[in-house]
Amino acid sequence: MNFIFKSVLMAFHLLLALILCVAMIMLPRNICHILIQYWAKRLLRILRIKITLSGEVLKFLSKDTYLIVSNHISWLDIPVIFSLKPITFVSASDVKTWLIIGMLAKISGAIFVDRNRKSSLVEVIQAMNHHFKNEKQSICIFPEGITSNGYQVLPFKSNLFQSAFESNKLLLPLSIKYKENNVLTNRTSFHGSTTLFQSFKRVAKSNLIEVVVDIGHPVKPAQSRKDLSLKIQKAIALKIN
């Protein structure tokens, strides 16, 4: 499937998202999640991205709720994870400004953090605690704070780990890596000065991308936040290399 054909399909898929956004205003949250999950799965099919799952898959897919901790490489990470299971994401506030994608994020119940405002972290942790208390859905955080080049895991920021302590939730490490021709690739990486369109173009030019999602063992919130974040960072990094 060539780039032009994928681009046409993607244009229609974005139009579908716009229609869904209008429809989902009047629908309950659980139905919205089903529709967004369908949209995410179809997006990956259009881009010819294959998902391979390994590790504690049954724990991840179960009805238990966790604070899921993942490395972050691409804008694709969220649709990849959401296609497997509806999850609430903690996302950077600038995602809200993305056309259509921002609308889907808000409708899905994403919690937005403004990293330029210190008080935002307190509000986000409170929102996470409230979610765990009232919703039967896991939360996923990307504690690197930015996307990496796909070959390494950047140092984790420990702030959002506080919610696991306050809500008494197990943490579930999740590692993501992208391969092309069975070799680790940075084709999907969305970092530096790369624009969203440039990133899409790079991804759409390949039909050989595989995303490997490995789920680690659940971890109890113990010791200090920094010790905990470092422990999980190292566990995820081992899966990438």
Image (tube, rainbow, N blue to C red):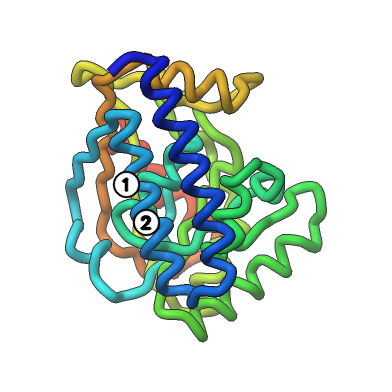
Q: Residue furthest bottom?
A: 134
Residue 217 in the image, given as x and y percentages of width and height: 25, 59
Q: The N terminus lies in which quarter of the figure?
A: top left
- Residue bearing mark 2: 37
Asked whether residue 82 is in view, the answer is yes
Residue 52 vs residue 91: left or right?
A: left
Residue 140 in the image, given as x and y percentages of width and height: 46, 58
Q: Tell me the SS state at disc 2.
A: helix
> Which residue shows up at 56% across the image and 57% down it?
21
Asked whether residue 227 is in view, the answer is no
- Choose top left, top right, bottom left or bottom right for residue 212: top left
Report the disc number at residue 41: 1
Q: Is residue 186 above or below residue 106?
A: above
> Which residue shows up at 56% across the image and 74% down it?
26
Residue 36 in the image, given as x and y percentages of width and height: 42, 57
Q: Amino acid at mark 1?
A: Lys
Q: Disc 1 and disc 2: Cα gap in Å?
A: 6 Å
Whether label 1 touches label 2, CB < 8 Å: yes
Q: Residues within 10 Å of mark 1 (few under 14, many from 20)?
A: some
